[in-house]
Amino acid sequence: MFDALLGTLTLIQLSLILIGVFSGIIVGAIPGLTGSMLIALTLPITFHMSPLHATSLLIAMYVGSITGGLITATLLRMPGAPANVMTVLDGYPLARAGYPGRALGLGITASFFGSIVAWVALAALSQPLAEFAVKLTPFNYFALVVMAMTLIAFVADRDIVKGLVAGFFGMLVTFPGVDPSGGEVRLTFGVNGLIGGFQLLPVLLGVFSVSQIFENTLNMGAKPEVVAFSNKGLFMSLSDLRAQAVNLLRSSVVGTVIGILPGIGASVGSAVSYLFAKLGSRTPEKFGTGSEEGIVASEAANNATVGGALIPLIALGIPGSVTDAMLIGALTIQSIQPGPLLFSTHPDLVWNVIAVDLVATFVMFALMLGLIRFYVRVASIPKYVLLPVITVFCVVGVYSLNNTMFDVWTMLGFGIVGFLMERAGFSLGPFVIGYVLAKVAEVKLRQGLMYTDGDITPLFIDPLSLVMLLIALVLVVFSLGTERKRRRARAAVYGADAES
Amino acid sequence: MRAFFITIETWVSAALLLTGITFLIRAQTLPVSSFDSLGPGGAPKTVAAVLVMLCAIVLARACYRSVTGAGEISGETPVNVAKTKAQPTPGSFVLFFLILFAYILAFQLELAHFVVITSVFVLAATMALRGLDRKAALIAAVSGVVFSVFLFVILTRFFVIRLPGAF
């Protein structure tokens, strides 16, 4: 661990972390652009980098982008990313009441604190969890993936049936190409380009970047209501920290725990934390009108989910969030197989990820406080300037991977698919998680069947597999049975607009 | 009932249902494996079957809602609410999509040098999004050229990627 920390203090590593956090904050601050998009756009570049440098850059972007969304959430009433939705509820009213600096200062400090708490969990839990995971049988692993996919659908922000549809469609898309166990070519429908299957990068760029670009072009009329920025109150005093101590700690722990649960992301973390803060507050009526507790709860939790989500990624090879699915993509591009054996096959890489998360947190804190005026200006760059440039990056980035236009058309196709699915109320998060986990699930299940000569009963007899499958089943049944209650609960948090 | 056929939810669900059926039919033709009982077709068949079933549920639910008038699942969260409350600009979207399609086609057919087609794309896309704004067009024209030259040099010299007009 100490060696890894020292390793991040080299000129190249520090430069990459600085670039990553800086660009992550900028992208996070611009409404319509997300950290996932930035990471997807950067993946082609990481192909030409070493795994250490690639992961340093991407983790730094991840950390920066979650915090960047705080700026527009507070000053423009537009969340930079879904993770910052709860911050809008109190950040904007507080800014509008004449305290923009204080709103931002609370958010920045809470983000820092949340990241540090999550980092402690990351450093402490990853290795023990990986050592446990190595002992998992193929059937255990398959059951874990099934549970992860069900969890994703469970927290899909609209409805579980549609979440499952998106997840299964994501899985279906992985099947064309070479069978991972037998080596036969399957389901190519006579298209030569599909012999290699739908490649990871075109699918991810299409679904997350191109679809988002289309969504933005459909909303060019959006005019943000801007609050003028001032530095006053930006730095929190010790008495402020004391007053928010319990809230900070609770929100950070909630965010970390939710981050660990596979497939669940920062938006859920911040929403749950916000609810807990409201329930535990002496002044719950102030929530939604500029409550400082609300801002702290939301921002501490959403940053804590970053570190929390890295735990299953490193220990199990299962993405803790959609952005982690991109990180898996980055490792795959580098021909590194994520999974519990990563600690033994690439320990330097794993400890580098943990170290970079810590260093990036400090860099994020310094950059946010030091360059806040610059970020506020950047957040106001017109979309008609940004969108064409980002589109070119997408096209060229995808093309550069294999020098084939099939990938570019695939990206455009999935861009259309992603755009239409979002419009129809299907979440893209389950789609991406399904896409990333499908091959793992199939390989593990078939491995298990090979070991047992085709007998599937051990899957249901093994206590661990059985428990995980039962959790998956209970989640599905529970969600279907309480769909209406969940919608009302969402309305209680988000307001009447969300009750549907 | 008419409302059922005009919502995007219906068409997307139907498209996914058809995709599932296609995969299911095709997966039936895959050979059985001698290594494991599932074979190359087992997982695709299972996933496709579940997808078809789930899409059928979504369609049935949408049909029921349109017949009984029980309201629609809009799937809106505050993020989407913030977007949809603004005036939608479908014209910008359609134009942008067509320009993007033309750009990719020009890229594939190598109709002109990369710098030329990219600069034209940036200018055309900006005008599609901004309208006939001279200032925006001038900025787009200049930045488009600078950006595409920069990108061309980086990609061809440092990453040795073949672009239209590179070699």
Image (cartoon, rainbow, N blue to C red):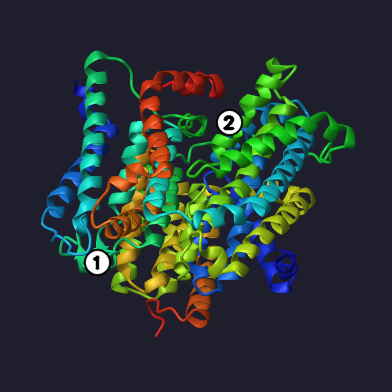
Q: Which residue is drawn at 32% across and 56% down?
A: A448
- Please state if A20 lies on the left or on the right of B111 as rendered: right
Quick check: can you spot residue B92? no
Residue under pointer 2: A271
Q: SS for tag 1? A: loop
Q: In which quarter of the image is the C terminus of chain A?
A: top left
Which one is in front, A293 or B161? A293
Which dot, 1 or 2, sits closer to the camera? 1
Residue furthest bottom in the image: B167
Q: Which residue is drawn at 60% across and 37% down?
A: A84
- Please state if A477 lies on the left or on the right of A175 as rendered: right
Q: Report the chain holding disc 1.
A: A
Q: Which residue is drawn at 58% across and 31% down?
A: A271
Residue under pointer 1: A182
Asked if the residues shown at circle 1 and circle 2 are in contact, with their CB atoms under 8 angstroms apart, the answer is no
Q: Do pointers 1 and 2 mark residues of a single chain?
A: yes
Sequence-first disc among 1 and 2: 1
Q: Decide: is A373 above or below A12.
A: above
Image mark for residue B28: none
Q: Quadrant of the N terminus of chain A?
A: bottom right
- Image coordinates for residue A425, horizontal then vertical, percent: 37, 34
Which one is in front, A485 or A200? A485
Q: Decide: is A152 above or below A86.
A: below
Q: Residue at x 33, y 49 (%)?
A: A170
Residue A236: quarter of image:
top right
Residue A17: quarter of image:
bottom right
Q: SS for tag 2? A: helix
